[in-house]
Amino acid sequence: NTYFTAGLASFLVAHIFYILFFARFRRNNAERKPWNIILLIVLAAYVGIFYFFLAPALEAPLKIPVFLYAIIIATMFAMAWHSGKMPAATVTPSATVTPSASPTTPGNNAPSTLSSPHHSRYASTLFITGAALFILSDSLLAINAFLHPFQGASLWVMSTYCAAQAGIVLGAVITNISVFNSQKTKHSTNETD
C-alpha cells in the first residue's frame, strides 16, 4: 500500500501539472472552446460509477486518495478537451493598422496567428487522445489491481500509458515549434521595417 500510494501521489502531481499546462493554453487562446456541459456530466458520471464499483475492493487508507486521483485525472481530460485552438498574438496598445496595409505587409502591426489551423487541430487532437489514453490506462490498472486481474494487464496498462505520454508530449512539441516559427517570422519581419 505504501508503494502504491507513493506512486499514486507522484502521478497525481504529474496530472496537476498537465492541468496547469492545459489551463494556461486555454487562457492564452484568442478563441476558446465553450465549456461542454455534457462532457463534464459524462466525466462526473464515469468517475462516480467506476468508484462505486471500485470502492468496496479498496482498503480504507486508499479510498480517499483513489477518489481524489479519479477526480484529478477527469479534470485533466476536461482541460485537454477544452484547450482549444492555438493562441493568437495580441495587438499591443501602440499597434496600428493602416487601411492600405495588408496582414502580410512588412511593417504592419496586425496580430498574427502563432500556428496554422492544421497544426492547432493536430495538437489539440493529440492532447485529447493522450488524456483519454491516460484514463483508459489507469482504469485498466485499477481493474487489474482491485477488481479482476486479467491476462496481459501489464502490457495493456503500459502501452496505453506510453501512448498517452507520447500524445501529450508530441502535442506540446508541435505547439512550441509552431509558436517559435511564428515568432521568428514576426521578428524577421520587424527587422525589415
Image (cartoon, rainbow, N blue to C red):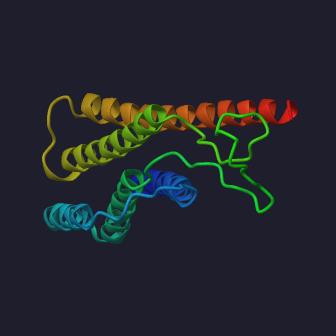
Where is the N terminus found, in terms of image quarters? bottom left
**Relative depth, front residue between 157 and 144:** 157
**Relative depth, front residue between 148 and 16:** 16
Q: Is residue 150 left or right of residue 185?
A: left
Residue drawn at point x = 31 percent, y = 67 percent: 67
Q: Position of residue 114 (x, y in %)?
A: 60, 40
Q: Residue furthest front?
A: 100
Q: Is residue 62 above or below residue 31?
A: below
Q: Is residue 54 visible?
A: no
Where is the C terminus found, in terms of image quarters? top right
Q: Position of residue 170 (x, y in %)?
A: 49, 31
Q: Position of residue 101 (x, y in %)?
A: 70, 41
Q: Is residue 34 left or right of residue 40?
A: right
Q: Position of residue 28 (x, y in %)?
A: 58, 57
Residue drawn at point x = 44 percent, y = 53 percent: 83
Q: Quadrant of residue 154?
A: top left
Q: How many marks?
A: 0
**Relative depth, front residue between 184 and 69:** 184
Q: Is residue 129 visible?
A: yes
**Relative depth, front residue between 72 and 115:** 115
Q: Is residue 12 left or right of residue 128?
A: right
Q: Is residue 38 left or right of residue 6?
A: left
Residue drawn at point x = 34 percent, y = 71 percent: 64
Q: Quadrant of residue 60?
A: bottom left
Residue drawn at point x = 54 percent, y = 38 percent: 172
Q: Is residue 68 above or below residue 85?
A: below
